Amino acid sequence: MKFHCIVSVLLAATLAAGCTNDGDHSSVGFGTTSFANGRIKVSDNAATVHVKGAPQAVIGTSGSLQIGHDVIATNPAQQALLRDYYRHAAAVREHGIATGKAGAAVAGQAISSVAKGLASGNTDNIDQEIDAKAARVELEARKICLDLVGVKAAQDALAAQLPAFNPYAHVIDASATSDCKTIEKP
């Protein structure tokens, strides 16, 4: 691993330091649970979707949907799609935390390996020691990509089957998942 890669890993670890999971206040980076440019926010019991010009939509873990102050009537198939949406959105959060932790482990390994290599005068093994940990970061990042594919699939199906969801049908667009098409499931 080149020196500039080590610096990148250390930066990732700094970002990972913002990851917490303290009961009901789980968060990913900088104290927020949001993704998709802040338009989807995930908590332990709901995914809240924000779009300009529409009230927020709250998707409960049970498959409920509330838009603004109105509870939206849904059928069992729509509820299943809403549960899928929440499940995939929550997975983005959980895999984000795992990616941050894996990044921190890489940073720790990098610091240890560099210090050990410099102290011994043998820097030849630094790459090997760090690459093993870096593979875990890549695996977790792939999971996030696949989670976004799941959110988009649920979003698209909801837009087709539930007219009230149409204002929220473009929060995750094709460009957000285009790189995921070549990724195999972990």
Image (cartoon, rainbow, N blue to C red):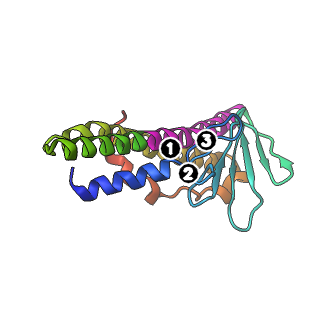
Asked if labels 2 and 1 touch by Cβ distance under 8 angstroms, the answer is yes
Residue 58, numbered label: none
Counting from the top left corner in percent of width and height, residue 71 is at 83, 45
Q: CA distance from mark 2 to mark 3?
A: 22 Å
Alpha-carbon span between mark 1 and mark 2: 9 Å
Which residue bears the numbered disc 2?
Answer: 29
Q: Main secondary structure of the magenta part?
A: helix
- Is 85 magenta? The answer is yes
The residue pinned by badge 3 equals 85
Q: Please report whichever mark, 2 or 3, sits nearer to the chain's N-terminal start.
A: 2
Q: Earlier in the sequence, mark 1 or mark 3?
A: 3
Question: Is 139 rendered above or below residue 49?
Answer: above
Read off the residue under disc 1. 96
Q: Position of residue 78 (x, y in %)?
A: 68, 38
Q: Which residues are magenta?
A: 76-101
Q: Residue at x 16, y 45 (%)?
A: 123
